Image (spheres, grey):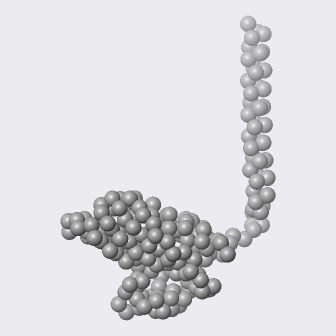
Amino acid sequence: MGRGSDETGARAGRAAGAARAGFLLRCGIVAAALAAGGWAVAAGASTPPAAVTVAVAAFDNDDTAGESAERTAAHAARVDGFDELLGAAFGSTGPYRTVRIACPAGGCSATTARPEALIAAARAAGARILVYGGIHKMSTLVQIGKIQAVDLSADRLLIDRLFTFRGDTDAAFARAADFMARQVDEAFARP
């Protein structure tokens, strides 16, 4: 009986030692990966990248679904708030900071403002990137989005893309905003 408990204790000790060794090995691998990736492990040893300023203009709404007034109004409200949703998505995508633009008289979207006025307003707000577009609701299930983004410092079009997404819900619009922010981020990262 005494011998069995000695073996059990020895096995438990070996298992605990192996677990500690495994934990330390994993910590070492993570530290090596951080160091190899250029991240400094010591506190204050690196400076985070400077935030890129993004101005998101109001998105245009084109609803041809022919639904009830209540559903049409709910969709319009989602499109009206899409610029803020997209701005928040940029914040979680990378080192971006959104800035508000002072809208020219008559509106702040690609169809309500002259392009020169929209670009001037974005530059005046200190934006490096201007994002604009629209959402066309074909039916309850199908939305078609158009997004364009311009690098104002380089005077170049970063992205000009059509995309589709399903659903006319808050969650569907949030997924679309996240997707668009990632697309612009990828385009901005390419020379």
**Residue 133 placement (x, y as % from top left):** 44, 76
Q: Residue furthest left?
A: 68
- Residue 6, percent across and down? 77, 15
The percent coordinates of residue 71 (x first, y second) are 25, 65
Furthest-top residue in view?
Answer: 1
Q: Residue at x 78, y 31 (%)?
A: 17
Q: Is residue 18 left or right of residue 68?
A: right
Residue 78 location, quadrant: bottom left
Q: Nearer the viewer, residue 139 or 60?
A: 139
Quadrant location of the N terminus?
top right
- The answer to whether 185 is drawn above or below residue 157 in the figure is above
Q: Which quadrant holds the C terminus?
A: bottom right
Tag count: 0
Q: On screen, 2 above or below 152?
A: above
Residue lying at 35% horizontally and 71% vertically, measured from the top left: 136
Can see residue 152? yes
State the residue at coordinates (32%, 74%).
62
Vertical arrangement, residue 71 with respect to residue 28, above or below: below
Q: Is residue 86 visible?
A: no
Residue 108 in which image quadrant: bottom left
Question: Can you tell which quarter of the image residue 127 is in?
Answer: bottom right
Q: Residue 26 at what x, y percent from top left?
A: 74, 44
Q: In the image, what residue occupies the spot 76% across and 21% down?
A: 11
Q: Is residue 116 above or below residue 37?
A: below
Give 144 or 84, whichever is nearer the viewer.
144
